[in-house]
Amino acid sequence: MKDADARALLRAMFDAALDVARPETCLAPFIAKLQPPKGRTIVIGAGKASAAMAKAVEDQWPHPLEGLVVTRYGYGESCKRIEIVEASHPVPDAKGREAARRILERVQGLGADDRVLCLISGGASALLSLPSPGLTLEDKQEVNRALLKSGANIVEMNTVRKHLSMIKGGRLAIAAQPAQVLSWLISDVPNDDPGVIGSGPTVADKTSFADALAVLAKYRLDPPASVLAHLKAGAAGKVDETPKPGDPRLTNVETIMVATPKRSLEAAATVARQHGCEVIMLGDNLEGEARELGAAHAKQAVDLLKRGGKPVVILSGGETTVTVRGKGRGGRNVEYLMAEAIAVSGTPGIWGLAADTDGVDGAEDIAGAIFAPDTLARARAKGHDPQAMLDDNDGHGFFGLLGDSLVTGPTRTNVNDFRVTLIAP
């Protein structure tokens, strides 16, 4: 297969994965079935897709509504009845804290005839940052930065976040009672656990203060004294726990998954088959160190190439982790892809793409990248050492110097990482 054709196919699969998860598409059937309540409809939400979700509701639902959602800077939409606030992600800022405070106030004092429509997508945890009493925004920023560098997975990170918050871990739903709470979720987490997506502001929490302390201990993190004191007080029963499964205060809550990583991978698989490719689906919940997964997928690709036959596509999703040791411009997807390219070692007939479906890999406004059989050779010709750049966690620097970064701009959706390896002799 020609290089240009391989790259076009990789991008077509990625675009198909995005299209099926766009709010205007995935919310439409749920909006069409939604009946107005006797009382008010209050729309709230948070996440990288929340503004686009709010616009879809506003454009497609003709009944009265009002509300407020918070999204990442650059991910806003123009709405008339729902206020859109932009704030910082992945490290929270004062705008996110203020938006979270106002959202919590919006749902209080409602009646049984009112409905809260909660729109949650990936990124909500950082954007809905309302510290527990006794904690500051600076405390949460410090903990967030440490967690992001530690190698902790999303379940572990959100276990800590939920126990430092006034709004996460089901607390938002309790504040809205006795109103009906309907949550529409776009999943960006392995296994689509609603308690993990955005730290589950309207969902019962299976984790505890003790679990949060265990995460900090596992990764040898030294949080601010106020954070440690708060978590220890919670573990000792001196601070109210998050609501647990079976809590009667959550009986009036309904949660619906409107888009998932699996559906996006299936859309990409359809494109691959239309182009005559065999598809190997590894699943939508792969985790672990990004570079280790990349090396494992490279070995699988080389073995498949030796087998011969028609082109093969390996698809996977999930959320890997990166233990940051270098000073480069890295994200987990480019870390994965660099490791895969190095392990493939220029073998002809193998290409790969890895990207975050929200358009942001790590803290960069770059979704991910593409590698080709000549990637390593081109880098070395420019005087760069691929392994040294990987060791420095400099994936964005590496692919940027080759012109192989994948820049989408704000996609306004988020169904986690998308990885595809194309084996085409």
Image (spheres, helix red, strand yellow):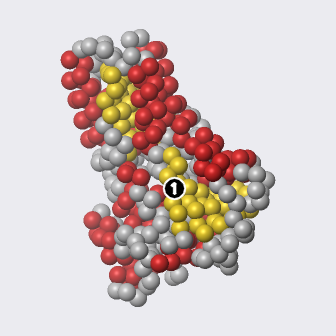
- Report if residue 28 is visible in the image: yes
Q: Which residue is mark 1?
A: 256
Above or below, comparing residue 132 to residue 318 in the picture: below
Which element is circle 1 on?
strand
Q: Quadrant of the N terminus?
A: top left
Query: Does residue 206 appear to the left or right of 11 in the view shown?
Result: left
Nearer to us in this view, 401 or 48:
48
Q: Residue at x 37, y 51 (%)?
A: 191
Is residue 96 or residue 15 the one in the foreground? 15
Nearer-the-camera pick, 72 or 342: 72
Q: Residue 375 falls in which quadrant of the image?
A: top left
Q: Amino acid at mark 1?
A: Ile
88 in relation to 205, above or below: above
Please tell me which residue is depicted at 46% across the width and 46% down the height of the picture.
260
Examine the rendered structure and indicate whether residue 245 appears above or below residue 17.
below
**In the visual, does 270 lie left or right of 47?**
left
Up/down of 150 relative to 110, above or below:
above
